[in-house]
Image (cartoon, grey):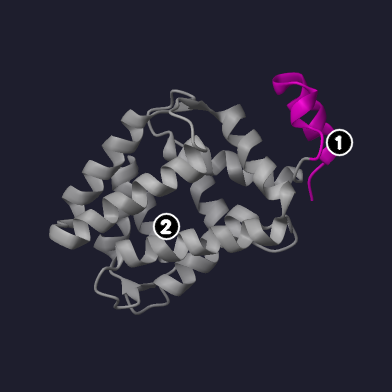
């Protein structure tokens, strides 16, 4: 368990009191910070349209996507960056702004927030698994994170192993469930292997 009082005191000191009124609990905010850092691979403390473009181009290259698959990947990426990172603005977005906007959406309607995140994660699954196999190979899975700038091979292997049940496959349903849990669950009594693995990344 985590001391929410200490966390909110620190948050208020860093961001101001407006960030601590009606906040998700400490555990979920910690996970949103990891989410932000997993996208902010240049460690600038902000996300820009340049980051979006870099990620898109690298993913398309690694995934060898062309034609309709390429168009779908770009459309999905742009839509989700706009909705979940920029929130309709042009950017850049700092970590504090990212947390504030995400928290606002979460606190407005937690069930709707979870539904939106599940829809987004499911849409992502159709992009990373365009053939609809229902699983990703290790190469396919690690290419996703290489597109974001994760380049530690040993860590990427351990990240794949979170979903590999011994058949050399990461099933997309499990990936979707894990990301939805990471982004929406305030329950710190349940293990979150995705969070634990991301936090072990050498350069998160």
**Residue 192 visible to the viewer:** no
For disc 2, the neighbor class at 10 Å (few under 14, some 14 to 19, many from 20) is many
Q: In the rendering, at what x and y percent does residue 86 appear?
A: 48, 35
When the figure is inspected, residue 199 is found, relative to residue 185, above or below; the finding is above
Q: In the rendering, at what x and y percent does residue 74 appear?
A: 27, 49
Residue at image x 68%, y 42%? 103
Give the label, 2 or 1, closer to the camera: 1
Residue at image x 22%, y 42%? 57
Residue at image x 34%, y 33%? 51
Q: In the rendering, at what x and y percent does residue 117 appear?
A: 55, 58
When the figure is inspected, residue 97 is found, relative to residue 84, above or below; the finding is above
* Main secondary-structure element of the magenta-colored stretch: helix
In the picture, the disc for residue 159 is 2
When the figure is inspected, residue 199 is found, relative to residue 186, above or below; the finding is above
- Where is mark 1, residue-wise? 5
When the figure is inspected, residue 110 is found, relative to residue 204, above or below; the finding is below
Residue at image x 68%, y 49%? 106
Task: Give the camera-side residue of 154 and 69.
Answer: 69
Task: Give the camera-side residue of 140 and 105.
Answer: 105
Does the magenta segment cover residue 160? no
Q: Quadrant of residue 138?
A: bottom left
Q: Tell me the magenta residue range.
A: 1-22
Question: Is residue 53 shown left or right of residue 180?
Answer: left
**Residue at the limit of the structure toward the front, as seen here:** 88
Question: Is residue 106 shown left or right of residue 52?
Answer: right
Question: Which type of secondary structure does the marked residue at label 1 adopt?
Answer: helix
């Amino acid at each position: 368990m985590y001391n929410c009082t200490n966390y909110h005191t620190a948050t208020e000191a860093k961001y101001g009191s407006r960030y601590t009124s009606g906040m998700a609990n400490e555990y979920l905010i910690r996970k949103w910070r990891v989410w932000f850092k997993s996208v902010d691979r240049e460690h600038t403390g902000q996300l820009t349209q340049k980051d979006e473009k870099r990620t898109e181009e690298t993913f398309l290259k690694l995934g060898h996507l062309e034609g309709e698959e390429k168009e779908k990947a770009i459309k999905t990426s742009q839509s989700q960056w706009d909705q979940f990172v920029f929130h309709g603005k042009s950017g850049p977005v700092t970590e504090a702004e990212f947390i504030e906007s995400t928290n606002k959406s979460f606190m407005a309607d937690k069930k709707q927030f979870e539904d939106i995140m599940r829809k987004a994660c499911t849409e992502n699954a159709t992009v990373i698994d365009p053939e609809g196999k229902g699983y990703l190979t290790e190469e396919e899975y690690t290419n996703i994170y290489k597109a974001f700038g994760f380049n530690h091979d040993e860590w990427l292997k351990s990240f794949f192993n979170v979903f590999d049940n011994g058949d050399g496959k990461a099933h997309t349903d499990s990936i979707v469930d894990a990301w939805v849990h990471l982004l929406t669950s305030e329950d710190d009594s349940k293990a979150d292997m995705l969070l634990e693995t991301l936090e072990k990344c050498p350069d998160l």
